[in-house]
Amino acid sequence: MKPKQKVLFICVHNSGRSQMAEAFLNTLAGDRFYAESAGFRPASVLPSVIEVMQEKGIDLSSKKTDSVFEFFRQGRIYDFVITVCDDSDEKECPVFPGITKRLNWPFPDPEKLVGTSEEKQAGLRRIRDGIKDRIENWIKEIQT
């Protein structure tokens, strides 16, 4: 059996987008990939992210955030590093050296959503669903 490809998802705080991407890849293709996520300035996983992922049957309530710098210091090696920072955060999104394949999938920052709480939740669901769709499409692309 072929070894799993290792994937690191990176965003600024590791509190939303990268956590969702990691969870979706491990859930949808954990037999082929091992995904982790980290951030430049790790915070806590957003309660609203935990809530919308629970709607998809994925529990992030015990997930901790990680530092991309700590992973680098530990000498971790990845087949793919995928940044999920939106274009306005791209300059803050960390780079992980020594990677064979680096991809950028920009998604809006959940912490920057505006409007009523219902509008913010709807926006977060759109981000979540967009990340899931991108993961599903990438899994198909990588198979061919």
Image (cartoon, grey):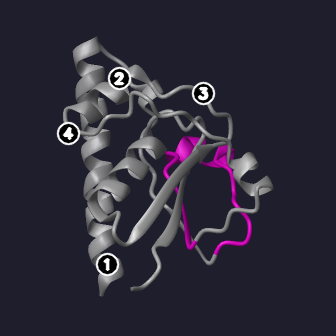
Q: Earlier in the sequence, mark 4 or mark 1?
A: 4
| Amino acid type shown at disc 1 | Glu
| Amino acid type shown at disc 3 | Ala
- Taking the spot 32% from the left edge, 60% from the top edge, the residue there is 135
Q: Residue 89: give x, y in percent of width and height.
A: 59, 42
Q: Is residue 111 left or right of residue 65?
A: left
Residue underneath mark 2? 48
Residues under numbered marks 2 and 1 in contact, where contact means CB atoms less than 8 Å apart = no
Q: Residue 105: give x, y in percent of width and height.
A: 45, 57
In which quadrant is the N terminus drawn?
A: bottom left
- Taking the spot 49% from the left edge, 50% from the top edge, the residue there is 84
Q: Secondary structure at mark 3?
A: loop
Q: Report the mark closest to the observer, 3 or 1.
A: 3
Quadrant location of residue 78? bottom right
Dot label at residue 43: 3
Q: Secondary structure at mark 1?
A: helix
Residue underneath mark 1? 141
Separation of residues labelled 2 and 1 (CA atoms): 30 Å
Dot label at residue 56: 4
Q: Is residue 112 left or right of residue 67?
A: left
The residues colored magenta run 79-99
- Taking the spot 48% from the left edge, 28% from the top edge, the residue there is 45
